[in-house]
Amino acid sequence: MRSPGALAIAVEEFQRAGVLAVLIQEPPAGTPVRCGAYDIVRDLNARRPRAALLIAQGVPYKVGTAAEDHVTAEVRPPGWGRWIELTSLYLGRDKALEHVLGRVKGGPWSLVGGDLNAQSGSWCSRAPSRQHQNQYDRESWRRGAEIDRWADSENLRCVNVNVGRDTFRNTRWGSAIDGIFLGEGLAECCAKGADVMDLAVPSDHEALGLSLAPPRDGRGDRQNGRTAKGRRNPKRTNWEKFIEHIDKRNLGTEIRDAEELERRAGQLERRLKDAVRLSTRRQTAGRPGSKNWWNEDLEKLRRTYQRKRGKARKNPEVPALAEAEVEARRALLKGIKQRKRDAARKAIEAMDEGAVKRWAKPRALQEWFDAEQAMDYF
């Protein structure tokens, strides 16, 4: 994509398709830092960069590396509770692979993709035939094997599903020399894989599209009402809801073979997980509103303290703001102690005589110790 006009058309197509981020190879010279609804991350010192990233405006991102042949940035998509690392890669034949791949590191939440200029069974279905076993073809497959070894060392997996369909085509020949690799974490979020997108982009390379769903680890966007992952205590289980969900669906026909047994076991496991999730609330670190002694007055004190603390952090050279932060913290702690004392007194007043005696009785030791043995030991 060396033409500015082709880049403009591609940006319009990606924006119309709702693409969040795009890995670009061989962008035109003098590519701006912003085009349409995308920010462009590239090496600003290179006269003709070979790799770039297009990130939709409004999506938080942090630039890691902006080199001539690879660009890395961390983005945080909407609905995700974590950052994912994107790397746009161009492996030219004028450079050794270790010169570029040695600087690209993978991780469980990494996505690496681009123009590989190599062939491998991971992203190309064609095996080297006798008609094409020339020096160029043999070198292409040798480079592909080296890329596969690098991906294995970085725990990355190729997710191309366009096997049998070329991603590059010119007037003489076509081949599949583009690939996308995912880490273990992102691979679980990819349901289909990377396939050729149906876009009207004037380029000799086809665009590979990939859809990722937010991970199911409880670290979603808190603005969407999700909470942090926490432990589920059996004491908090609503057993009526649990049994109701288990009995919601019948087991079906009898088991006749091993495949039916394996499928039924998977269904039962998923049903048990759903039953636990629906009937047992998570025990998180807790929000102030979840405590029975918390009230609106303490909530106001907490917000005041956070506001004072933020001002003091932004202006550390102003002593008055630091003093205001200390006073707000003291007021919050004093209010918490008073509310806890009042809540404990009300709880004791609501107890009957037997409950008060049990509450006041010291806990017995779990083990019995002999006094003489203890003296001899110490």
Image: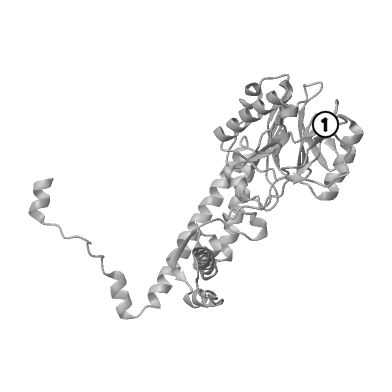
Question: What's the residue at 59%, 55% (across, down)?
Answer: 216
Mark 1 surroundings within 10 Å by alpha-carbon count, few (fewer than 14), some (14 through 19), many (20 or more): few
Q: Is residue 139 above or below residue 113?
A: above
Give the quarter of the figure containing the N terminus. top right
Left or right: residue 365 versus residue 53 is: left
Give the percent coordinates (x, y) of residue 148: 61, 33
Q: Provide the residue designation for mark 1.
A: 173
Give the percent coordinates (x, y) of residue 234: 43, 67
Please tell me which residue lies in front, 171 or 4. Answer: 171
Give the percent coordinates (x, y) of residue 360: 29, 70
Question: What's the residue at 56%, 38% (across, down)?
Answer: 155
Give the quarter of the figure containing the C terminus. top left
Q: Is residue 246 above or below residue 135?
A: below
Residue reaching furthest to the right: 5
Q: Element at badge 1?
A: loop
Residue 228, quarter of picture:
bottom right
Left or right: residue 261 versus residue 102 is: left
Give the percent coordinates (x, y) of residue 226: 61, 59
Q: Is residue 68 above or below residue 353?
A: above
Please tell me which residue lies in front, 69 or 279. Answer: 69
Residue type at mark 1 is Trp
Question: What's the residue at 64%, 61% (across, down)?
Answer: 225
Q: Is residue 36 visible?
A: no
Left or right: residue 263 versus residue 182 is: left
